[in-house]
Amino acid sequence: MERIYYIGHALPDNNIHLASTLNIAVNNNEIGFLKSLNELEKMKIFTLIPMASFPKDRRILIKKGKLEFKEGFESTIIPFINIPIIKQISVIISLLILLIKNILFDKKNGFKEFKLININVHMFFSIPVYITAKIHKCKTICFLMDNVVEKRTSSFIKRQMYKIDGFLAKKIFTTYNGVITYSYKSATEYAPKVPCLEIYHIIKDELLPEEPINKEIGKNINISFTGSLTNFNGIKYIIDAFNFLPYNYILNICGGGELADYIIEKSREDKRIIYYGVVPNSKAITLQAKSDILLLIRAMDNEDEKYLAKYAVSGKLPEYLATGVPVVTNDVPAIPEGFRPYLVIIDSYDSQVIAEKIRELVEDEEIYKSYISVALKGRDYIIKNCNWRAQSSKIKEFINNI
């Protein structure tokens, strides 16, 4: 018999309060991925609760425990000491002990083969997975949701730490027996000989607008952005684009992040800019569906942002496309090929270029209708492909063949 172990950050909906740094969209994707694996009926899950280190998060000792998912499976909490540096070491030791103890137990109960799947190339996951695989001759699979190498602009000491982590990540990534990823480019560039399966970000059924809203150009043109308010997401370029647009063009923004105060200031200066703050997913989806155009701009002002533009596939793209509203985005390598026919792609993130394309779309009713027609085809593509029912058969086949 074969046993699958999954190591990640997944939390049940009723335990989300335990995490101080949880990305809800990522958590939803993990749960969907686990639902696919759970159909194999031979899975154990181990969860590292995502949280900031002490003193940002006041909790110091995270104890082992159980998490119950409404989807019908449970997870074991990985215990650790939540103090910088000690945290990473304690996670590695705790996870290594958990994996080895569980494998020894399962071997006594008739399991002979093991496959270890962990999210991303984090050393606190990858090292214990690598050691366990060597000891017990397990197959290993990386579910690559982010980038192989994490690049961040920060203090000198942290930059050196990221360099060391990146060096180790590139080395250990090549040791996996398989990779499941949102970015085929990222996986194959760092490990060209490792079998790879590219999948799409998933849109939960309850977050799909029931029907596309019939679009007719009105007096005001509603443009929307929802997501993280960071420079990489082109917020400043989007706002600056409104300097080149008439008074009846309205910009709706939802989300939080480092540029939230900047958005608030700009909304006071220009009444066309409406900032809703952080809102529930359902409200953001409704706002998107009622918009005339949706914007997803990727800035590439430094090496970190260029790296992200090359490898980081946006989970916002399928969410936008699912609305049936035209999506304007600049051309970056990370856009999945399957999405490209349904997007309005511009060759620059320059503010004037953004404004010109917006006006081109909406100032001629026939042209706008043609873009709506393409957007509705994009919605159909997303509904058909960006769900776990469509993805699960590919995932199970890939894992079974490793």
Image (tube, rainbow, N blue to C red):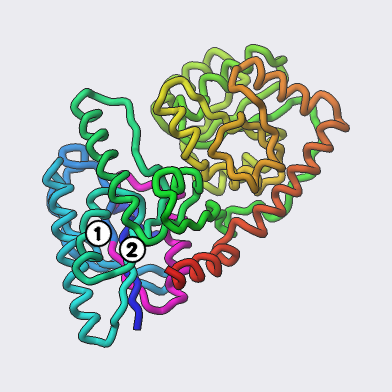
Res 343 visible: yes
Question: What is the quadrant of residue 203 in the picture?
Answer: bottom right
Determine whether, in the image, residue 253 is placed left or right of residue 376.
left
Question: What is the quadrant of residue 53 in the picture?
Answer: top left
| Image quadrant containing the C terminus | bottom left
Density class for disc 2 (Cα within 10 Å; few <14, some 14-19, many ≥20) is many
| Image quadrant containing the N terminus | bottom left
Determine whether, in the image, residue 394 is placed left or right of residue 261.
right
Q: Which residues are magenta?
A: 19-46
Question: Percent position (x, y) of residue 47?
Answer: 29, 60
Question: Percent position (x, y) of residue 229?
Answer: 46, 30
- Give the distance between the C-alpha atoms of the residues marked 1 and 2, in whole angstroms: 8 Å
Determine whether, in the image, residue 293 is placed left or right of residue 392.
right
Mark 1 in CB contact with mark 2 (< 8 angstroms): yes
Identify the residue at image location x=62%, y=40%: 287
On whether residue 300 falls in the magenta region, the answer is no
Kindly identify which residue carries mark 2: 140
Disc with the residue nearer the chain's start (1 vs 2)? 1
Question: What is the quadrant of residue 250 in the picture?
Answer: top right
Against 9, residue 231 (above or below) is above
- Element at badge 2? strand
Pick the residue in front: 208 or 38: 38
Kindly identify which residue carries mark 1: 130
Against 236, residue 143 (above or below) is below
Identify the residue at image location x=18%, y=27%: 157
